[in-house]
Every structure is written in C-alpha cells, then in structure tokens.
Image: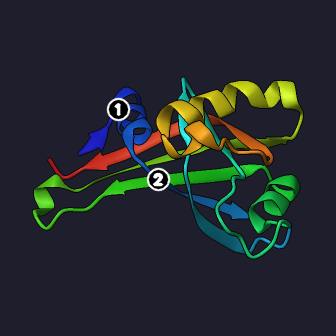
Amino acid sequence: MRLDAREARRRFGAAPVARLATAGADGAPHLVPVTFAVEGDTVVFAVDFKPKTSTNLRRLRNIAANPAVSFLVDHYDDDWARLWWVRADGTASITEEETARQEPVRLLREKYPQYAERPPEGPVVSTEVSAWRGWTAS
C-alpha cells in the first residue's frame, strides 16, 4: 500500500538512520548510512566525528558533481505485515559556512544525544526533497 507524502515524511523523520545514495559524474552509484534530521521538506546531515577512512569523502565529491540524491529508510520485521519503506528524492547542496550550518546542526543535536556534547564540525549537506515515496505492507 502506498504511503501519502505526509505519512512518508513522518516515518522517515522518526527513523534513526537512512541510506544515502549518490552518483558521481561517472554515474557510479555510492550508498552509505547517515544520521539525519528533517525540517519540512529538507533533509540535513553533517560530516561528524565518527571515524572515516578519509576526509575526502566520496559522498561529498559525488554531490558536488551531481546533486541529485536519494535517501532510504525502512522497517523490517519477521511479521511481513509490518514492513515499510520510505524514499526521499531531492537536490543536495553542501555548506561549510558557519552561519548556514547553525540550524542544521541544531536539528541534528536535538535528534541525537551523541551530538549534544560533540556536535558535527564538518560540512553540512541540505537536501530539498522533491518527492516523498513510501510503501507499507498493511
């Protein structure tokens, strides 16, 4: 059963983690988990202190080359009547400017207690969602 945009946005925003899909100029797909927050039709995430193999992150390089992105959250249950997923498609932009980072970082700190004492210090990515799509088994 298809979820309407309002319910899809609600379920998406309540999820603890999403998968971010990007593609670079070469079209090669790249998928990574991200922590995120939602404000209206905007999804935000930031580069944080969790260990990474490099500061030259492919997700950021891909967004710079091709700002079209998708996020996916889902709920799996052994009772398949409880399955659902939501996808948010949109256009992403990256900022490192401190004033523009303040509101997204505040949203992330409100959602994740881990950010209360150590907020993200890296670039912030804001995605203007153009389509919320979702499905539920019941």
Q: Position of residue 63 (x, y in %)?
A: 79, 54
- Give the camera-side residue of 77 and 80: 77
Amino acid of disc 1: Asp
Q: Quadrant of residue 33?
A: bottom right
**x 48%, y 35%: residue:** 111
Q: Which residue is mark 2?
A: 17
Query: Spatial distance from mark 1 to mark 2, Cα to Cα?
Result: 21 Å
Q: Quadrant of residue 126?
A: top right
Q: Position of residue 132 (x, y in %)?
A: 48, 38
* Residue lying at 74% horizontally and 26% vertically, measured from the top left: 102
For the point 62% across and 61% down, the residue is 21
- Vertical relation: 2 (above or below) 40: below
In the image, 32 versus 122, the foreground residue is 122
- Seen from the viewer's position, the closer of residues 37 and 135 is 37
In-image side of 65 versus 4 (left or right): right
**Tag 2's secondary structure?**
loop
Q: Disc 1, disc 2: CB below 8 Å?
A: no
* Callout in the foreground (1, 2): 2
Check disc 2 and give the amino acid type: Val
> In this figure, which residue is indicated by the disc labeled 1?
4
Lower sequence index among marks 1 and 2:
1
Give me the residue at 49% from left, 54% from top.
18
Q: Position of residue 122 (x, y in %)?
A: 79, 48
- Does 71 sit above or below residue 126? below
**From the viewer's perspective, is 116 left or right of 77?**
right
